[in-house]
């Protein structure tokens, strides 16, 4: 199989627009912003305006939608400079068109994927090359080849990325940047090969499941993609899929099933800090300049800290969204949860040592070391003798302290250097395609995920579904249209750029293996972006009769994996001509 796959540009469309309010007080700057990068923004602004880090404070307790687009852009700089010149506070809010003109999004791409396989379907060659677009001053090439490096084993690889310099709005991070469109191309090719070799699409993927990282040979920290496929196929009813194309019909509609794999690399940011304060009433407060974009950061970390401290959830509070607090990592790369978790673990270890010091010789804990105790039931107890227990209130009262405070910093993420760490997923889709109009209707989606420990099932399910819905938009409705003469975006409104609405979203079911990753904090890996990586197919022109696959999850450009619906196909040759 040797084909070209093209994806259009996409723009950020968080419902909450980018807005900033700034005020100067002498040489001190206060910035109320909506940003995923609180501490980095404060540091950058200090350098830009010649200030000391302590002279800039960025507040962003709630971000709204981010998806990679809420960072430091021109509008913050303009507002700060205007406030300085005017001598009064300034508020600046971008309108929808302003977001399109300034913020950027996902780059267009053209990708070649070629697969060679032996008679058993085992890959002998995997080629993934292509081009993305970036202005000359850009610094964010779309890394579409990352997925090809980790998904499948092969005897040989050729992976090459290039970019073309064009005068367009700079692309930027957009949920699973690179992986979303790169996985689309690879999974198209895999399905086309499965059809050509008459092998079940899941079975072909199983035969090429790697035991170690296919490129650099590192051991996987934990990988159960085959289990995710087995569990998902059983729940979805994959056995009902007709092996012969085109056999399922309802009137004008041809109905079929498809599947696809997804992969997103694990990341844990260095330098995450958390301040932990234990109060005299037995309650605790966490503090970090972390961001809340609706993914449940505060909820999950409060749960984590409550469990680690032996307190009820109601007794723990998380202060966040303020650069004056200990520096937290940016919210990106599906990394914030494990990054903050590692800092909380470090802070808790410090707290144990401090509590034992404060307990003194009159405590039932006297003589015990940190390794000899655990935090449970609102206090400290011996691991060998539960009778040797003292509450936090008692320890602080004897020491005449209202509170005890420690700050923890996450350890260096050495696990990323020693192991191949990826969240993976198996996606299933059932849809129908009209013989008359080529219209695509997605009936149901199921995502089966292998992402380590799921810390909060409710917030995790929301993240998975959100990614899958965003994948529907990438696949079927969203496309940034450029004026070929000037590079100017032509559809810079929600009336002309179509994001999925409720009527576009089918029944969505999510499930997960729940197998802990022994190398990561809490056994968890990222979940914010894996949901989109295996969801999107792509027709070059949405709403028209598609020359590419209609299958939302298998993403084949042929008719193979959605059981041969008679959708017109237009194979693209190596010169890019249909």
Image (cartoon, helix red, strand yellow):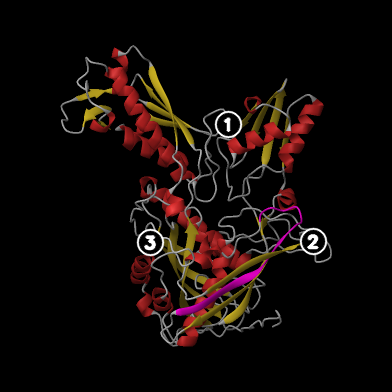
State the image quarter where residue 482 is shown. bottom right
**Residue at figure coordinates x 58%, y 42% from the top left:** 36
Q: Secondary structure at mark 2?
A: loop
Of tags 3 and 2, which is closer to the observer? 3
Q: Which residues are magenta?
A: 123-140
Q: Which residue is mark 3?
A: 223
- Callout 3: few (<14), some (14-19), or many (20+) C-alpha neighbours within 10 Å? many
Instruction: Please state which of residues 496 and 29 is positioned toward the viewer in this rendering.
Output: 29
Residue extending farthest to the top is 400
Task: Give the distance between the C-alpha atoms of the residues marked 1 and 2, in whole angstroms.
Answer: 37 Å
What x and y, as percent, mark residue 73? Answer: 70, 43
Residue pictured at 62% horizontal, 53% vertical:
173
Q: Is residue 563 visible?
A: no
- Residue that carries the numbered disc 2 in the rendered image: 487
Label 1 sits on a secondary structure element that is loop
Q: Position of residue 258 (x, y in %)?
A: 46, 75
Q: From the viewer's perspective, tell me whether residue 23 is left or right of residue 259.
A: right
Circle 3 sits in a helix, a strand or a loop, which is it?
A: loop
Work out which quarter of the rendered image holds the C terminus and state it. bottom right
Dot 3 or dot 1: first in sequence order is 3
Mark 2 crowdedness (10 Å alpha carbons): few <14, some 14-19, many ≥20: few
Residue 58, x across and y down, in percent: 62, 32
Query: To which residue does mark 1 refer?
Result: 323
Query: Which residue is found at the position 56% from the left and 27% from the top?
Result: 324
Q: Which mark is residue 386?
A: none
Q: Is residue 110 above or below residue 413?
A: below
């Amino acid at each position: 199989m040797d084909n070209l796959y093209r994806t259009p540009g996409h723009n950020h469309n968080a419902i909450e627009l980018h807005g900033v309010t700034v005020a100067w007080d002498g040489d001190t700057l206060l910035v109320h912003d909506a940003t995923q990068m609180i501490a980095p923004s404060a540091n950058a602004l200090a350098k830009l305006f010649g200030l000391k880090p302590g002279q800039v404070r960025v507040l962003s307790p709630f971000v709204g939608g981010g998806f990679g687009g809420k960072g430091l852009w021109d509008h913050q700089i303009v507002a700060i400079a205007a406030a300085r010149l005017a001598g009064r506070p300034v508020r600046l809010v971008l309108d929808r068109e302003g977001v399109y003109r300034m913020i950027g999004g996902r780059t267009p791409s053209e990708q070649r994927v070629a697969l060679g396989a032996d008679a058993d379907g085992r890959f002998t060659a995997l080629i993934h090359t292509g081009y993305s677009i970036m202005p000359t001053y850009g610094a964010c090439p779309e890394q579409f080849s990352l997925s090809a490096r980790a998904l499948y084993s092969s005897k040989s690889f050729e992976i090459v990325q290039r970019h073309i310099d064009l005068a367009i709005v700079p692309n930027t991070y957009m949920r699973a940047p690179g992986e979303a469109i790169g996985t689309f191309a690879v999974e198209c090719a895999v399905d086309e090969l499965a059809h050509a070799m008459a092998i079940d699409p899941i079975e072909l993927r199983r035969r090429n499941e790697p035991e170690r990282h296919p490129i650099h040979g590192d051991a996987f920290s934990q990988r159960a993609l085959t289990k995710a496929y087995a569990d998902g196929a059983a729940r979805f009813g994959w056995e009902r899929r007709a092996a012969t194309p085109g056999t399922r019909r309802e009137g004008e509609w041809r109905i079929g099933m498809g599947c696809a794999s997804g992969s997103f690399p694990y990341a844990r940011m260095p330098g995450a800090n958390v301040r932990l304060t234990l109060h005299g009433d037995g309650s605790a407060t966490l503090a970090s300049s972390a961001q809340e974009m609706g993914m449940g950061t505060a909820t999950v970390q409060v749960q984590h800290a409550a469990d680690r401290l032996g307190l009820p959830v109601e007794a723990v509070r998380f202060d966040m969204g303020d650069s004056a607090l200990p520096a937290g990592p940016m919210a990106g790369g599906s990394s914030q949860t494990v990054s903050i978790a590692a800092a909380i673990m470090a802070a808790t270890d410090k707290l144990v040592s401090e509590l034992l010091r404060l307990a003194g010789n009159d405590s039932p804990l006297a003589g015990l070391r940190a390794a000899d105790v655990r935090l449970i039931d609102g206090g400290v107890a011996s691991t060998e003798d539960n009778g040797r227990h003292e509450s936090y209130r008692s320890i602080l009262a004897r020491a005449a302290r209202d509170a005890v405070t420690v700050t923890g910093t996450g350890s260096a993420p050495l696990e990323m250097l020693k192991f191949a760490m990826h969240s993976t997923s198996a996606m299933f889709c059932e849809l129908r395609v009209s013989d008359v109009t080529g219209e695509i209707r997605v009936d149901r989606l199921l995502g089966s995920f292998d992402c380590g420990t799921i810390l909060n099932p409710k917030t995790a399910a929301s993240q998975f579904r959100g990614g899958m819905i965003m994948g529907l938009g990438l696949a079927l409705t969203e496309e940034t249209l450029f004026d070929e003469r000037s590079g100017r975006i032509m559809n810079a409104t929600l009336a002309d750029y179509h994001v999925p609405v409720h009527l576009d979203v089918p029944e969505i079911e999510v499930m997960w293996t729940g197998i802990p990753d022994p190398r990561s904090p809490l056994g968890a890996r990222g979940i914010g972006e894996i949901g989109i990586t295996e969801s999107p197919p792509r027709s070059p022109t949405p709403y028209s009769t598609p020359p590419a696959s209609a299958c939302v999850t298998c993403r084949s450009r042929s008719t193979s994996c959605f059981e041969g619906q008679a959708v017109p196909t237009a194979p693209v040759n190596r010169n890019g001509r249909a």
